[in-house]
Image: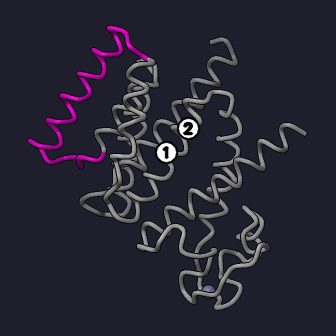
Amino acid sequence: MTILLIIILNAVLISTTMCLADRINHRIAVFKKRSFCLQCNHPLHYYDLIPLFSALYTRGHCRYCHAKFGLHYAFFEFFGTLIASYFMSEIIIWITFYLLLFLSLEDWHNERIHADILLPWICYLLIDNWNISKIFALCTILIISLFLVYYRHAMGGGDIPVLLIITLITPTQGLALTLLFGSVSALIYLQTFRVKHLPFVPFLYFGWLASLLIQKVITMQGL
Ligand SMILES: [Zn+2]
């Protein structure tokens, strides 16, 4: 019963985070009115908002105007719910998971993020992780990031707080894996879609999640 409640809670939170990102990306007031179709403005009923099932049932289309909104909602609601439910007992990872999900969706759509919402979380994590090796790792990542942003222009300024948070909550090996997975997936995307630049936060987020899951598997198998 408890597991079911955890899954339902996370499914609702994933759906709400995606809705929040959609509204901000389309410059719609967050508390303006109940959920509605972004194409035809038709208000959505409760049965249009059931995480995972509604998107699958309509095959990613609006029930009223049949405009396609995509099956990525179902994808995120399914895998996001599984991952968030799994990490719910690790509250710092769980909170970071939702913050970075929101910022990844924002970066993917706008190539800009509200990175300042991370500042209070960085302050808290800094106090919570105050030790010399973590501060050294943080300073190293900060200096490299500043070089890449302001000298090489290879990253956006919004990527810095995301990198700092991942550095603060991730062991050294996990950070190395995060950067490896994030960079390799970004390179694959650049080559596959023949684009010259991309939003990096979603790839960092993917790298972080992949490294978390790999570390969990290694820990479970006692390797
Ligand atoms: Zn519609």
Residue 63 x %, y %: 71, 85
Residue 219 x %, y %: 64, 17
Quadrant housing residue 192:
bottom left
The correct choice, above or below, for 118 with respect to 55 in the image is above
Left or right, 53 with reference to 16: right
Colour convention: one colour
Front in this rendered view, residue 22 or 191? 22
Given contact means CB atoms under 8 Å apart, are the residues at marks 1 and 2 in contact? yes
- In the image, which disc is placed on residue 138? none
Q: Amino acid at mark 1?
A: Leu
Quadrant housing residue 54:
bottom right
| Mark 2 closeness class: few <14, some 14–19, many ≥20 residues within 10 Å | some
Quadrant for ligand 1 reads bottom right
Residue at x-position 70% and y-position 53%: 78
Q: Quadrant of the N terminus?
A: top right
| Mark 1 closeness class: few <14, some 14–19, many ≥20 residues within 10 Å | some
Left or right, 3 with reference to 198: right
Q: Which residues are magenta?
A: 129-158
Instruction: Count how many numbered circles sit on residues in the image.
Output: 2
Please give the residue where the numbered disc 1 appears in the rendered image.
Answer: 99
Please give the residue where the numbered disc 2 appears in the rendered image.
Answer: 95
